[in-house]
Image: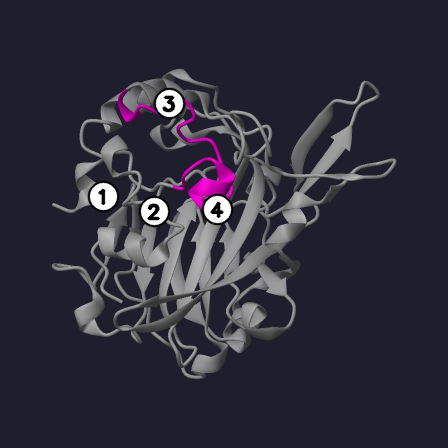
Amino acid sequence: MTRRAAGRIGRRGVFLCLALAAGCATVPAPVPLGPPAAFVATGDGLAARFAPVFVPQRPDLTHNRVGTPFATRAADGAEHVGVDPDRPAVFVRRIPFATARGTYTNLVYRVHFTRVPYAPRFSHVSAGPNVGLLVVVTLDAAERPVLVTTVHTCGCYLAFLPTAALPEDAYPPGWDSGGQGVWGEHLPGRLTLPAGLGNARPVLWLRAGTHRVMHAALMTDAGIAAAFRTIPAPLRPVEALDALPLAGGGTTSFFHTEGPLAGYVKGSSKPLELLAAAWWALDSRVGVDKRYGPADKMRTRFYTSLKFWRRTESDMWPFADFLRYWGWRL
């Protein structure tokens, strides 16, 4: 049994009871006809070349659309931070790292959504506002994508998607290249590289409401243009999230920058996950979306295991150590 699977046993029952008790069902809007909508990052350079494409279920519902964080200031000076679903954007940073086996480049992409709505389903235990998804595309020294890592910006629902360019001896022992189950979704165990490797980029299909990755593939730009109704999403540096413009002048950060909430997304809350997991994960902010960065600077840790004694080892920021913890041998 993998660490990922072991961590789920015993929690599903608690999560399911809470999710079924929360919220109410809504009548869905009509599904649009025609090719599926896909949010495609636009820009130049290496980051644009490998930027993931996001294909949400039900893009007619605003909470399923990739948006842009914004901030407003009330007359009394109070700030409000939210996500505008009508202005898509993808935020990116480039981070090199090295292991004993080689040198790599991580292209770290971040997108945000208005919320995960409350609904009487287990998967909606992550309900709350200002949620996000992180996608890390790992390139080898030859600038080939060898691994795609997806995780929600709370550190939850981690998934690894190796590509055919990754050597077999870099996989965790017992890895099933035929497929994998990740929190109720069935994902590929390996992504096949299409012809025209230089233009291959991840395409991620997202579950309506929860934004969980439900399928993934590598596709060329020509294949993407033929298969989807593309929606441009400007590629922006992640530093822009620390300079959201305010009406009347000035800027503010999407994240708390001081106090006990430093490093967490403003306005983010996950009450169902708090009730379900805080007491045994020993974290009163479990499930809250956060900044991706070094723990000593952002004063919170981007851990990916709910085992409180494994927070340091599962921290995603020191990426080589993080991969080693989860069994990858890049």
Residue lying furthest right = 248
Disc 3 marks which residue?
Answer: 19
Q: Report the residue marked by disc 1.
A: 4
Type of amino acid under label 2: Leu
Q: Quadrant of residue 70?
A: top right
Q: Could you tell me if the residues under marks 2 and 1 are in contact, i.e. CB atoms within 8 Å?
A: yes
Label 1 SS: helix
Please tell me whether residue 124 is drawn above or below residue 33 in the rendered image.
above
Could you tell which of marks 4 and 3 lies nearer the N-terminus? 3
Marks 3 and 2, the one that precedes in the sequence: 3
Q: Is residue 102 above or below residue 7?
A: below
Badge 2 marks a residue whose secondary structure is loop
Instruction: Please name which of the two marks, 2 or 4, marks the residue nearer to the observer.
Output: 4
Checking the image for residue 158, the label placed there is: 2
How far apart in space, not on screen, are marks 1 and 3 (Cα)?
21 Å
- Quick one: SS at disc 3? helix
Mark 4 → mark 1, Cα distance in angstroms = 21 Å
| Nearer to us in this view, 209 or 89 | 89
Label 3–label 2 contact, CB within 8 A: no
Give amino acid for label 3.
Ala
Q: Amino acid at mark 4?
A: Tyr
Mark nearer the viewer, 4 or 1: 4
Q: Which mark is residue 82?
A: none
Which label's residue is closer to the chain start, 2 or 4? Answer: 2
Q: Secondary structure at mark 4?
A: loop
Res 290 seen here: no
Q: Is residue 27 visible?
A: yes
Q: Nearer the viewer, residue 260 or 255?
A: 260
- Residue hosting label 4: 292
